[in-house]
Image (cartoon, grey):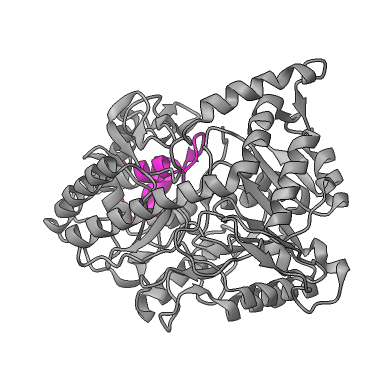
Amino acid sequence: MSDTQLSARALESKLGEWRTGGSAYRGLADRIRLLALDGRLTAGTRLPAERELGVRLGLSRTTVTAAYRELRAAGLLSSVRGSGSVVRLPGSGAGSLAAAGPGSGRASGDTGVLDLSKATMSALGGLADVAARAAEDLSRHLNGPGFDPVGIPELRAAIAERYRVRGLPTDPEQIMVTIGAQHAIALLARVFVSRGDRVLIEQPSYPHAVEAFSAAGARLVPVSVTARGSAGSAAEAEAEAGAAVAGLAAGSGALPARAAGGADPDGSSGWDEPALLQALRGSNPVLGYLMPDFHNPTGQTMPAEQRTRVIEAAARQGTVLIADETMGELSIDRSDDFMPFAAYAPGERGSVGINGYGTAVDSGTDVGTGAGTGDRGTVVTVGSVGKTIWGGLRIGWIRAEPALIRRLVAARTATDMGTPILEQLIVTRMLPEMPAILERRSRELRAGRDHVEALLAERFPEWAVPHVDGGLTAWVNLGRPASSQLALAARNHGLLVPAGPRFGVDGAFERFLRVPFCHGALEMERAVDALGLAWGSLLRHPLPDTGYLADVV
């Protein structure tokens, strides 16, 4: 649990444009509630004193007191005389994201609540049978401690082989098994980042990666990634980019980068390469965090030529790139076969192998034109089976040079002793079947994507819904800065969906909503119905046109 004291100035920055024309105390309470439920205010955060916040927001102390009282009644705030007011999450009910069960599309303990906050599929069919067979392999490990800091040899070999057939030769010594991808990201952040170091981050990005780097003391350098077909106007881009500037003003530590928002001024999609290269040269970050394949949340894939240029630029600056490939193999109908991101690094040599769909790929020449094998360590890869097999199977990994693997293993014991053996044995059995697994998942995701696109087009013709060719999510442009209010209204109709600012550095993205298409057809129909009711309630009460500030949340 966090124990952070939030200043009135910092909370004001997070609140953004919270005034909706109704009761001031209720509007303030609603926005703080959404920030807490979305995770933008973590449990244990100490809010500013009522008088201090009132002065900052231009409100009476009585108004702030009434807002805090409403939050306490909802179970989102605890106050002790002399100790202040601390954010907490209720232990049960629709309002608690922590209570929501993964993959099912429903919140555990309340089958009437749909949870779209998690982009993950239900468990692969037959997983229980594989687990039973894997338990038979357990006997030969029972004389050991039952956990392993680097990974059992057979799983490391299976992961290395998976990279080899995808065109990236890998030795088992280059693999470390972790407790999921998030554990891997947090471990890399602790090892590489010292307080004040700069870390390049995509904008929008995976929220828990942002949290991991921030917890390590990083100063974040955001660079834009734009969804195909959902880019806004140049004015929207300027407004979204302002979030980074607002973050600096609030002391958040985020550094502004050109077009660090939801849309490039020219309306193009993908990574803002000039800004990315400029950020590498100008900020000299120690790390860069990228999701080059089926980026979460926009669904974008980085072109091959751009991968080479970005890796070479990072190598020149001594920046280590973390390639998060947890969604990297979830292709639906992508026409090009992409090798793992690290295969485009100077000095990495491909091989003739079989890609994820059983097709032979020939990458027998050097990929890239860099300085040589000394640059191979520029890219560190993070992977997992959480998106392909099941989120409840907490197995991930890091692919890196052996020297870095040894360094990570040494640092790991400060927080955990290793990965459970039984789960490793399950994944060891399943990795050789990955081509068939991916083909099955591709069919499921294609049906889900097409169904959700049709539902949204019929119900919300004014929304811009990008057509993605892989991944699990669509980054939908609502056409107006209403994401936080929509997410809050949707909760009243039994739907948990994260607001767009949850994926931004210092907010922004009020015009966007991440909609996963990996849940069942009936569940998504119910979800779109709930969104329709919530959207209708907002349209009946027109939102104020506050211009620039509306996007800074």
Report if residue 345 is visible in the image.
Answer: yes
* Residue 74 against residue 137 in the figure, above or below: below
* Quadrant in which the C terminus is drawn: bottom left
Towards the viewer: 144 or 256: 144
Q: Position of residue 371 (x, y in %)?
A: 85, 76
**From the viewer's perspective, is 204 left or right of 107?**
right
**From the viewer's perspective, is 181 left or right of 7?**
right
Q: Position of residue 384 (x, y in %)?
A: 62, 44
Residue beneath the point at 78% across and 20% down: 141
User: Magenta stretch?
Assistant: 32-61
Towards the viewer: 13 or 41: 41
Residue beneath the point at 36% across and 79% down: 235
Q: Residue placed farthest to the bottom in the image?
A: 266
Towards the viewer: 50 or 516: 516
Q: Position of residue 330 (x, y in %)?
A: 51, 54
Which of the 4 quarters of the picture holds residue 74?
Answer: top left
User: Magenta stretch: residue 13 in it?
Assistant: no
* Residue 25 against residue 243 in the figure, above or below: above
* Residue 264 against residue 531 in the figure, above or below: below
Residue beneath the point at 72% across and 63% down: 342
Q: Position of residue 19 (x, y in %)?
A: 27, 55
